[in-house]
Amino acid sequence: NAGVTQTPKFRILKIGQSMTLQCTQDMNHNYMYWYRQDPGMGLKLIYYSVGAGITDKGEVPNGYNVSRSTTEDFPLRLELAAPSQTSVYFCASRGAGSRNEQFFGPGTRLTVL
Amino acid sequence: GEDVEQSLFLSVREGDSSVINCTYTDSSSTYLYWYKQEPGAGLQLLTYIFSNMDMKQDQRLTVLLNKKDKHLSLRIADTQTGDSAIYFCAEPPGNRDDKIIFGKGTRLHILP
């Protein structure tokens, strides 16, 4: 199993550009999450999904969109990039296990200039 | 609202014990978690404790839970250079099981 994979690893965007951060998991997990990590701020939940076709806003959803058309994929879309979206983005997934462990991807480092 | 608090930095000499502390607000959580983030990587579950336990030991790791004070700690015995990482305390908010709240993370620095 590859676990949770994210692409790209790094990206530089200009203000106003758009992009999609890809996330795929091969563990047949129903739950998937997008977080952003800023220095000294911990992880903030952007969006999450409890299954295909269902998405919910997290703590900081503004400026982002998601979709969940399949169990495996949970892409995060930035429509009009802003410098405040410079961050490291992590995707995670979780199965139905009793301890609710989340499995994280390696992250995408995004810089908006 | 739900919140998880932890100090941001800890420096420890190699071979000593490290103790990372956390306070949380939601007393209905079934589990409490410690995640570890190594440089340039995503988070990985390090250990967890059921809310009906006071202590859990796993090799060099000891987790202590004080439910009365809503205090969780992680002790790493015989700290090694490979323990250098950011450690996150986390809990599910409001007895939900669809998401968890992370603390800001404690960066553990190992002194030679």
Image (cartoon, coloured by chain):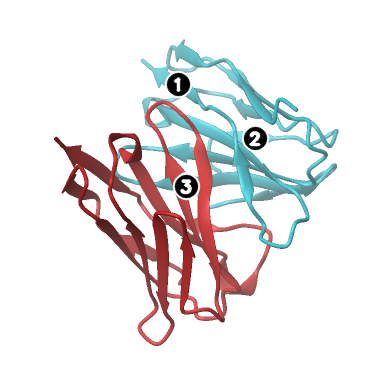
Chain colours: A cyan, B red
Q: Position of residue A9 (x, y in %)?
A: 52, 16
Q: What residue is pinned by disc 2? A: A65
Q: Earlier in the sequence, mark 1 or mark 2?
A: 2
**Quarter occupied by residue B75:** bottom left
**Label 2 is placed on what type of residue?**
Asn
Q: What residue is pinned by disc 1? A: A110
| Circle nearer the viewer, 1 or 2 | 1
Quadrant position of the N terminus of chain A in the picture: top right
Q: What residue is pinned by disc 3? A: A44
Q: Tell me the distance, in whole angstroms, between the alpha carbons under discs 1 and 3.
A: 15 Å
Whether callout 1 and callout 3 share a subunit is answered yes
Q: Nearer the viewer, residue A77 or A28?
A: A28
In the displayed structure, does residue A69 sit left or right of residue B48? right
Residue drawn where x is 34% and y is 40% of the image: B83
Q: Tell me the distance, in whole angstroms, between the alpha carbons under discs 3 and 2.
A: 15 Å
**Label 1 is placed on what type of residue?**
Leu
Residue drawn where x is 50% and y is 34% of the image: B42
Quadrant position of the C terminus of chain A in the picture: top left
In the displayed structure, does residue B60 sit left or right of residue A94? left
Label 1: chain? Answer: A
